[in-house]
Amino acid sequence: MADSAAVKASDVAPVKKDKKAAKEAKRERRAAAKSDAPSQTPTAPSGKGGLRPAASAPKVKDTAVSTKAVTGSLDEDLSTVGVLGDASLFGNVTLPRNARVNSASWSTALARGTIHPAVLDLCHQMSTFAIRGANKRAVAVLRALSAVIEDYKTPQGAVLSRDLLTRVSQQVGFIVESRPLNTASGHAVRFLKYEISVVDASLSEDEAKEHLIGRIEHFIRDRIVYAAKVIQTHAASKIHDGDVVLTYAHSSVIEGTLIHAHNHGVRFEVIVIDSRPLFEGRLLAERLLEAGIPTTYGLIASLSTLVPRASVVLLGTASLLSNGAPYARSGTAMCAMMAHGFGVPVIICCETYKFSDRIQLDSFVVNEAGQSSDLLSQEDDNTLTDSVLLTRAECGAQSRLKVVQLLHDVTPPRYVSAIASEVGLSGTESVGVILRDYKSVLFGV
């Protein structure tokens, strides 16, 4: 019996290996066919100077851009065309929704009356990046949900704490479809949901709604506004006369810190580093100049030239991971690493409600992609221009060319000198301790 069992096992093993090898060979043949198909596709000149597939050519999978997309108006985005494709490296990156899909979704929701108008307005502003910055997004989300609560009417036979929680979750889900919530907005929504779930059942509907709106205002005042003022005091204490402060893009906390130090008589200069496509640093530079602070503006390509002039680097962040790594606007990691190489201290300014219990070792585990068309030339495809940027026609003609705009990056904590929060100035290792000991204070639960 033992011999026969051994023989059967030995017979089965080669069969399994042969099947596995056959599957791998079949997969390789398919991959080779896909890679050869675009290169074998004949092309013919289009009517507007671009390239289009010939009529007899086989259709290429969605990686190629149609003639209509190539020669379309500049208002059309490439959020679903030629972006990321099947690149496994970006499998966890959240892609932006097509503008036409968003418009259709908003129109349907408005017609059905399921989504509050304030939420629809918020979705439009967030998807078009009219609202930028973690604090502004969190405040905007809370204001929109406050309008939902104000107009809410409890259905007959329903309990406010349960029905309102369902209604708010529906609104939040619609917001997430337009653009994913960042850590700050997520914690703000979590706080509100907790407050709704524990509202006193003995309160009338008007009293309960007034209580919840008051709790929203309390969160905005204490966790965002007052926390920013405390951080400004801590960070400004590290700026001295004659210092040169370097910062990247635009952070409301950093802006307040620099103006706070200037108003207290400290004389210093500021270097604002910026990058395309958002160019957020322009707004910061304008406001600093209006306040009378000497400011130098430069793009990230000049970072290695400007960092040696700096005395301290102040950076904002969208979130602070539990290992002390800032998850911030793309380019922040480059600034921190360059400053570390030149021996310039780096201080991250972040409110504690942005602290996250997640750990992320790179920027590909979780990230968000912006509109890829922002990285392409905004000139018309038929217009002669000296721009060295790719046009939409050139991008569409290359089926293997992928365009991606990652909005955030992760800075290794070893490049951060200190964390400035309302708790005080501390090291990166303190983030985990604050999350552990003050979790009920941070998240409102």
Image (cartoon, rainbow, N blue to C red):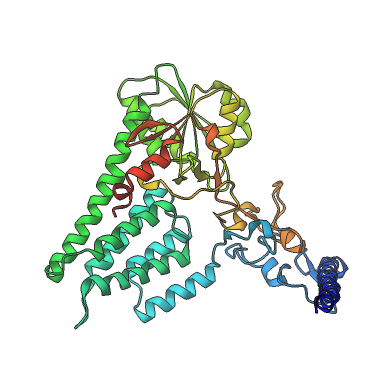
Q: Residue at x 63, y 52 (%)?
A: 375
Most extreme residue toward the bottom is: 156
Going by the image, does 207 lie left or right of 5? Answer: left
Q: Residue at x 22, y 55 (%)?
A: 215
Quadrant in the picture for residue 341: top right
Depth check, front residue: 86 or 77? 86
* Residue 90, above or below 51: above
Residue 421, image x, y percentages: 36, 36
Say which quadrant the C terminus sits in.
Answer: bottom left
Q: Residue at x 38, y 45 (%)?
A: 435
Going by the image, does 27 lie left or right of 444? Answer: right
Going by the image, does 133 lie left or right of 42? Answer: left
Most extreme residue toward the top is: 242
Residue 26, image x, y percentages: 84, 73
* Residue 412, above or below 55: above
Could you tell me how many numbered marks the image carries?
A: 0
Q: Residue at x 49, y 43 (%)?
A: 280
Residue 244, image x, y percentages: 47, 22
Quadrant in the picture for residue 391: bottom right
Say which quadrant the N terminus sits in.
Answer: bottom right
The reply to whether residue 299 is in sight is no
